Amino acid sequence: MTDVHLNTLRQQIKSWGKALGFAQIGISSTDLPQAETALAKWLAQGYHGTMQWMATHGAKRSQPAQLVAGTLRVISARLDYWPDSAQEPWSVLHDPQQGYISRYALGRDYHKVVRQRLQQLADRITAAIGPFGHRVFCDSAPVLEKPLAEKAGLGWVGKHSNLLQREHGSYFFLGEIYTDLPLPVDNPSSNHCGDCQRCIDVCPTQAIVAPYVVDARRCISYLTIELRDAIPVELRPLLGNRIYGCDDCQLVCPWNRFAQPTQVDDFQPRHGLDAPALVALFRWNEAEFLQRTAGMAIRRIGYECWSRNIAVALGNAPSTVPVLQALHLRREDPSALVREHVQWALQRHAEVKPG
């Protein structure tokens, strides 16, 4: 294809992406030397915790052509997820009898939604030019999504390590199409965090150990989603009522005053999980958990870790009769992991007279 044809195709791809509901499409080259160096340093410091898969793919994560041979460009896409029908986040976080779930996880599993739309975009390109080399991703392979999106002009990586965009904040998902098409690239985004460090100051566990550096071992999203073992005892009181993920660093970010509500109905809350009662959640059996989280990202942590997280939140809740009853009912839970966290929660209440 000539340069003229490639430039026309580039504009068409952006237009087709918008028609599919993406907020923005950008195109980048594949060289990521700075991100590669930063990743190696982060891994060397052990900040990935038990996420061994972060270190097992070698150069495939930072060198796209190592993952998909022949890759010359990366088409990055943003899809807004902010669920405007959800309960106001701070009202839930300030009510210790409710459980807080990160707003991205309240609806349908984003992996499926984003990948389907990216595949539709790839199919549209195929219809226009014929078969071409490509592979679609959404948080599903060793891909440095945020550095690639930054390079493609979709935003900049903020001090909390999330991607930020001046007109949309940070409440969006990312996805990519690796391709062998030598498309013209977009200009990278510039950083607009300035002197602000609200995200660093608000982090409940002080997981942002330096600007742009997160120690996952202290991050509540890691502790409640990725970690499969016991949550460190010293961090449990700091989790508060956060039972799946954490949004604090995004909630205080000034750029999120520009966040746009999602246009995807699938991302709206399901089963009242935007402001659920902890006691009610803890009474779910595994069949109820599987049924009520069907098609949602929450299901991936499994019933055991779900119960572990809620036990911690109940340990941080007021010492009411319903809270204590809910914990006592699961003192002999079949899971040793859950039993240990239930016992911790009961010990937390031992010195407080039930209300």
Image (cartoon, rainbow, N blue to C red):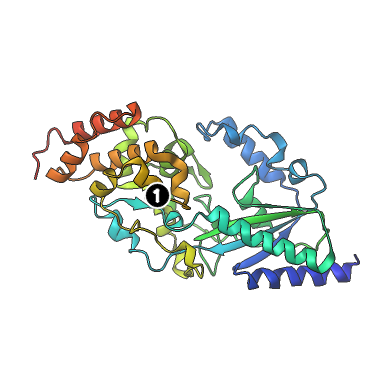
Percent position of residue 270, x then y: 39, 59
Quadrant of residue 123 within the rendered picture: bottom right
Quadrant of residue 69 within the rendered picture: top right
Percent position of residue 115, x then y: 62, 56
Residue farthest to the top, as pictured = 336
Residue depicted at x 35% and y 58%: 271
Q: Is residue 121 left or right of residue 48?
A: right
Q: Is residue 336 left or right of residue 19?
A: left
Nearest the viewer among 69 and 265 is 265
**Pointer 1 local density, CA inside 10 Å: few below 14, some 14–19, many at least 20:** few
Q: Secondary structure at mark 1?
A: helix
Percent position of residue 72, x then y: 80, 52
Q: Which residue is mark 1?
A: 291
Q: Quadrant of the N terminus?
A: bottom right
Residue farthest to the right, as pictured = 2
Residue depicted at x 48% and y 57%: 108
Nearest the viewer among 161 and 302 is 302
Residue depicted at x 57% and y 31%: 52
Q: Amino acid at mark 1?
A: Gln
Whether residue 252 appears in this view of the structure is: no
Q: Quadrant of the C terminus?
A: top left
